Amino acid sequence: MARVPNPDLGDLRGLIACPRCDLLHHTQQLSDGERAKCARCGSLLIWPRTGAFLHVVAFSFTGMILMIGAIFFPFLKISAQGLSHESSIFGVAMAFSDGWIAPLALAVLAMIVALPVFRFAALIYTLWPLANGRPAYRHSTTVFRLVEELQPWAMAEIFIIGTAVALVKVAGLASVSLGPAFWAFCVLIIVIALKNSFMSNWTIWDAISQK
């Protein structure tokens, strides 16, 4: 495990900024299994792993399938006093599609579905040629930059956590049955966590610039 020191700022080439404290460091090539940490706060900066690109592509493809399926499959069913209602994510969004709250439907679909799917597709576009030892596709730099910039707005994980909290309160008032879409979102959280464990942004940027 390596800690990269604070550099001389006379030459800005080959520098990496800590994502937490913004301390600049000189980059260096690490062997598989080694990690570079920030000298100030200890945040991970570089952690190359063998086959990481292919793993990220596989998890991204899996995430896309889960997300697309979760849109239309039933999410949950609520029953109370002999009445029941079953709905999907798409159905919930469409319920807000009329009148002045129509932008809410777009926001729901964009942040919960569209942005995560786009990020998965963008990662596949960026890493597929690199995983196969070929030059990066055209505009890979722009596409991967979008992946990083849109990360705070892709809220699939936040949605399922918020839903779980809400269901705890609703369960006392009605009978709640969880549908396949709910479990697809739960699996999606695990897939995203596994994907992130293989991602080293600096390694990806370095591979894009060299190919």
Image (cartoon, rainbow, N blue to C red):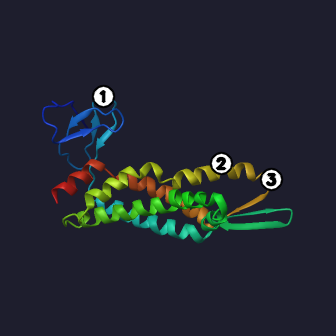
Place of residue 104 in the rendered image (x, y in percent of width and height, measured from the top left): 60, 57
Horizontally, residue 92 falls left or right of residue 203, namely right
- Residue 165 has which mark? 2
Residue in the picture at 63% in, 66% down: 94
| Lower sequence index among marks 1 and 3 | 1
- Mark 3 vs mark 2: which is more N-terminal? 2
| Quadrant position of residue 95 | bottom right
Q: Of the residues under marks 2 and 1, which one precedes in the sequence?
A: 1
Please tell me which residue lies in front, 210 or 34: 210
Helix, strand or loop status at disc 1: loop
In percent of width and height, residue 72 lies at 59, 71
Report helix, strand or loop for mark 3: loop
The residue at which mark 3 appears reads as 173
Marks 1 and 3 sit apart, C-alpha to C-alpha, by 50 Å
Q: Secondary structure at mark 2?
A: helix
Badge 2 crowding class, 10 Å Cα cut-off, few under 14, some 14 to 19, many 20 or more, is: few
x, y percent for residue 27: 19, 41
Please name the residue that numbered disc 1 is placed on: 40
Quadrant for the C terminus in the image: bottom left
Q: CA distance from mark 2 to mark 1?
A: 36 Å
Q: Is residue 23 above or below residue 131?
A: above
